[in-house]
């Protein structure tokens, strides 16, 4: 269904003469806005005067008028592209775009890009312009703007798999995928059922192309806000498919999902009814929500055993993490089955946007799943905690009451307390990471290096980077992560202790990429826990520089 662009309105100059401005030319009612405050700071920092805000707003209105006129006249390849460049230059001057104008421009760019028959250059320009306008989650949300998902899918479905007589190498499939990934957060969560009923029947287990294409549709269109209805299904599908291409896209999706859901409010079911549903495509249906489900109960969030994952799902993720490092084990032949299966995929799948590298995705999943969600183990005095210490009661009975009767009746053997599992720093995700690092510690050594060393060093680098990133995010006053789910100092210290030994082993590698990753990791850890990092580095670096017997 072709969107009706004529119903969209852009130019509304309004009573500009009635708006009061202050001495700097900035609207008086907008001076408290944080973006207007940033503009004032820019104006104070430059050594020259800038145009007043009222003048730049009139210029923006004029540019928007010309864009609307070009679209109305269907002058896309010349007029529209020219005035789009003017809007780009205007945005470079750091003047904030009002929210209503930003929404109107984003809708125009979206609908032009998904109009059938548009030139490829216009589609690419509109895709970049839409991302520039709508990429900030603070400036515009799904409550401000909704977009239809059907027009993107209709074009992508027809262009992805073409007959050899019809095939023409274009970037249309890539552009549609790019638009879908940038606009997915504006798809209404109530459309999830329609998406599932559209994408899942396309899956044919005997053809890898249909598996990868249906997976791309699912992971590019499904909203990230309410995954309760489809996340278990995605994991069940993942367990039955052996493909590196499938794994990379799935890990990329789960990394974004884990980062999004550190805040419990994102997945609140009551928000579905609060979001206006004004973008229903032809043939779509909406579920009828029961009034009992919309009661005002406390929503604890989408938290499960480990972050937003169950124990079984987390075990699958850690198995994928071990397989992703491509470490040669006894059954090394099993590592090649995934790439061998991917050889059967058609070249059409390569026309879609590629997912990010699996190593950063794995690190982000682990870091954003960390929380004080278990019984903390006693602090270890070992330089590297190789395993979770045994709970109290395994060797000597622990005292949990103050009465003499209970103390004398405590069992001397394995008691009830032996079944209570403890975790390093009280975090299940951190405990899994420590066990993983301890199991592959020998592969960080210079004498046991190989093609896997780069992946291992990059993995710990991204672990520390994402941990520092989340740590500083949770120190901001506007952080939405609950206090009982935030990172603790004990978790930070145990993480540094678990990664310190492997970093000191790999710092003498002969591979420049590995050394660069380790240096970045050590720099970050020296900021986190300087007393654990600086002295061991100096203890190894000074003698090696004096004797010149090491590679670095």
Image (tube, helix red, strand yellow):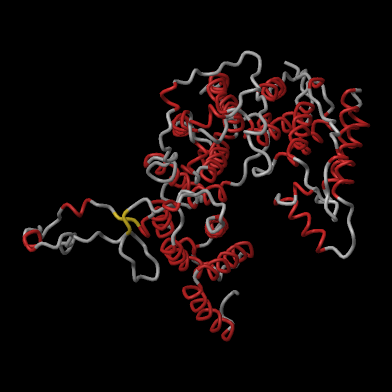
Left or right: 94 with respect to 541? right
> Vertical placement of 396 versus 196: above or below?
below
> Vertical placement of 480 versus 273: above or below?
below
- Quadrant that contains the N terminus: top right
Question: In the image as oriented, which residue stretches furthest toward the right?
Answer: 78
- Quadrant that contains the C terminus: bottom right
In the image, residue 390 lies at what x, y percent?
26, 60
Left or right: 205 with respect to 105? left
> Vertical placement of 274 versus 365: above or below?
above
Quadrant of the rendered image containing residue 387: bottom left
Residue situated in front as seen by the camera: 351 or 412: 412
Question: In the image as oriented, which residue stretches furthest toward the bottom?
Answer: 546
Residue sitting at 31 percent across and 60 percent down?
377
Residue situated in front as seen by the camera: 392 or 350: 392
Residue sitting at 50 percent across and 33 percent down?
227
Left or right: 32 with respect to 526? right
Residue sitting at 39 percent across and 71 percent down?
383
Residue situated in front as seen by the camera: 289 or 78: 289
In the image, residue 401 lies at what x, y percent?
15, 60
User: How many numbered discs?
Assistant: 0
In the image, residue 288 lies at what x, y percent?
49, 17
Res 459 seen here: no
Res 47 seen here: yes
Question: In the image as oriented, which residue stretches furthest toward the top?
Answer: 283
Quadrant of the rendered image containing residue 291: top left
Residue situated in front as seen by the camera: 10 or 488: 10
> Vertical placement of 148 versus 179: above or below?
above
Left or right: 197 with respect to 495? right
Residue sitting at 39 percent across and 41 percent down?
304
In the image, residue 226 lies at what x, y percent?
51, 33
């Amino acid at each position: 269904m072709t969107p009706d662009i004529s119903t969209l309105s852009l130019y509304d100059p309004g009573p500009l003469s009635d708006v009061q401005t202050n001495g700097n030319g900035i609207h008086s009612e907008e001076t408290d806005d944080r973006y207007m405050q940033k503009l004032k700071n820019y104006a104070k920092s430059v050594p020259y005067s800038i145009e007043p805000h009222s003048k730049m707003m009139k210029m923006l209105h004029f540019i928007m008028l010309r864009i609307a006129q070009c679209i109305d006249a269907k002058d896309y390849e010349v007029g529209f592209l020219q005035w789009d460049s003017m809007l780009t230059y205007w945005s470079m001057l750091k003047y904030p775009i009002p929210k209503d104008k930003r929404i109107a421009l984003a809708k125009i760019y979206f609908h032009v890009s998904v109009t059938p028959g548009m030139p490829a250059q216009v589609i690419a320009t509109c895709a970049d312009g839409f991302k520039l306008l709508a990429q900030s989650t603070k400036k515009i949300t799904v409550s401000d703007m909704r977009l239809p998902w059907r027009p993107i899918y209709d074009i992508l479905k027809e262009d992805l798999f073409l007959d050899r007589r019809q095939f023409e190498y274009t970037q249309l499939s890539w552009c549609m995928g790019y638009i879908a990934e940038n606009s997915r957060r504006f798809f209404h969560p109530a459309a999830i059922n329609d998406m599932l009923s559209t994408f899942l029947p396309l899956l044919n287990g005997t053809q890898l192309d249909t598996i990868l294409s249906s997976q791309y549709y699912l992971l590019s269109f499904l909203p990230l806000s309410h995954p309760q209805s489809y996340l278990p299904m995605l994991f069940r599908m993942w367990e039955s498919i052996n493909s590196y291409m499938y794994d990379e896209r799935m890990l990329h999706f789960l990394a974004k999902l884990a980062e999004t859901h550190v805040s419990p409010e994102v997945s609140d079911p009551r928000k579905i009814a609060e979001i206006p549903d004004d973008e229903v495509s032809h043939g779509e249906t909406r579920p009828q929500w029961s009034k009992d489900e919309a009661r005002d109960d406390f929503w604890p969030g989408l938290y499960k055993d480990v972050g937003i994952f169950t124990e079984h799902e987390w075990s699958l993720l850690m198995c994928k993490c071990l397989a992703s490092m491509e470490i040669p084990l006894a059954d090394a032949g099993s590592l090649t089955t995934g790439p061998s299966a991917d050889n059967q995929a058609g070249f059409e799948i390569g026309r879609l946007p590629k997912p990010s590298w699996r190593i950063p995705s794995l690190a982000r999943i682990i870091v954003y799943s960390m929380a004080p969600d278990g019984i903390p183990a006693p602090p270890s005095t070992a330089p590297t905690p190789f395993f979770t210490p045994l709970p109290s009661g395994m060797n000597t009975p622990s005292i949990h009451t103050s009465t003499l009767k209970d103390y004398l009746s405590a069992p001397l053997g394995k008691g009830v307390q032996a079944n209570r599992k403890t975790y390093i720093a009280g975090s299940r995700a951190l405990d899994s990471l420590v066990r993983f690092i301890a199991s592959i510690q020998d592969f960080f050594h210079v004498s046991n290096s190989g093609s896997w060393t780069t992946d291992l060093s990059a993995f710990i680098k991204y672990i520390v980077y994402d941990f520092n990133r989340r740590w500083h995010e949770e120190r901001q006053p506007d952080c939405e992560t609950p206090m009982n789910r935030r990172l603790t100092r004990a978790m930070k210290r145990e993480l540094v202790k678990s990664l310190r030994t492997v970093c000191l082993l790999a710092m003498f590698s002969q591979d420049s990429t590995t050394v660069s990753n380790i240096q970045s990791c050590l720099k970050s850890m020296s900021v986190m826990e300087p007393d654990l990092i600086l002295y061991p580095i100096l203890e190894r670096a000074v003698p090696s520089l004096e004797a010149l017997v090491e590679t670095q």
